[in-house]
């Protein structure tokens, strides 16, 4: 039996599986990473690069590890200043980044920056 015959005979089952798969992908991609009760964490890092991929800002940083952070608006966390953060963060400087979310490489999801503070170290202090 060819695929076309199988699909024609089992149209309802095939469409149902397609709808369930689509609902699963939407849930995993859109809903789970944006839930507002995710753990908020802080990282002290040096920014190594900043890029814009499609409509998403990415910030590459490092301390003893390499990190990629997303910088997008997050209405569930009251964040609407991604453009401002992207323009104010400078390569080569050290920051305390407050982030939320998870790194999901398969889906291209990274922890989202909610806030930042530049680390200024004064040797005289």
Image (cartoon, grey):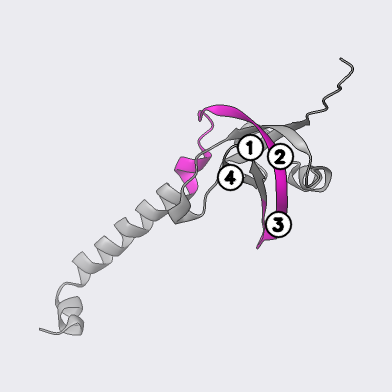
Quadrant of the frame with the C terminus: top right
Q: Is the residue marked by circle 2 packed among few (<14), some (14-19), or many (20+) residues within 10 Å?
A: many
Outermost residue on the right side: it is: 124
Q: Nearer the viewer, mark 3 or mark 4?
A: 4
Q: Mark 4 or mark 2, which is nearer the start of the sequence?
A: 2
Residue placed under numbered mark 3 in the picture: 51
Residues in magenta, as a range: 30-58
- The answer to if 21 sits in the magenta stretch is no
Q: Are dots 2 and 4 in contact, CB under 8 Å?
A: no
Identify the residue at horizontal 47%, vertical 44% (top origin).
31
Distance of mark 1 from mark 3, alpha carbons? 19 Å
Residue placed under numbered mark 1 in the picture: 63
Residue placed under numbered mark 2 in the picture: 46
Left or right of 84 in this view: 50: left
Image coords of residue 73 (percent x, y): 67, 44
Q: Secondary structure at mark 1?
A: loop
- The answer to if 45 sits in the magenta stretch is yes
Depicted 73 relative to depicted 123: above or below: below
Left or right of 84 in this view: 61: left
Q: Is the residue marked by circle 1 packed among few (<14), some (14-19), or many (20+) residues within 10 Å?
A: few
Distance of mark 3 from mark 4, alpha carbons? 15 Å
Q: Are dots 1 and 4 in contact, CB under 8 Å?
A: no
Q: Are dots 2 and 1 in contact, CB under 8 Å?
A: yes
Image coords of residue 86 (percent x, y): 77, 47
Q: Are dots 2 and 3 in contact, CB under 8 Å?
A: no
Q: Mark 3 or mark 2, which is nearer the start of the sequence?
A: 2
Image coords of residue 117 (percent x, y): 77, 30
Identify the residue at horizontal 35%, vertical 52% (top origin).
24
Distance of mark 1 from mark 4, alpha carbons? 7 Å
Left or right of 76 in this view: 50: right
Q: Mark 3 or mark 1, which is nearer the start of the sequence?
A: 3
- Res 66 label: 4
């Amino acid at each position: 039996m060819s695929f076309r015959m199988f699909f024609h005979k089992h149209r309802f089952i095939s469409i149902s599986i397609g709808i369930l798969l689509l609902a699963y992908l939407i849930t995993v991609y859109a809903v789970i990473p944006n839930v507002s009760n995710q753990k908020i964490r802080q990282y002290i890092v040096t920014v190594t690069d900043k890029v814009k991929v499609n409509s998403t800002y990415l910030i590459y940083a490092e301390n003893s590890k390499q990190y990629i952070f997303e910088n997008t608006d997050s209405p569930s966390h009251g964040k609407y200043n991604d453009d401002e953060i992207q323009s104010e963060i400078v390569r080569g400087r050290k920051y305390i980044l407050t982030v939320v979310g998870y790194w999901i490489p398969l889906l291209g999801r990274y922890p989202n920056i909610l806030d930042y503070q530049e680390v200024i170290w004064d040797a005289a202090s």
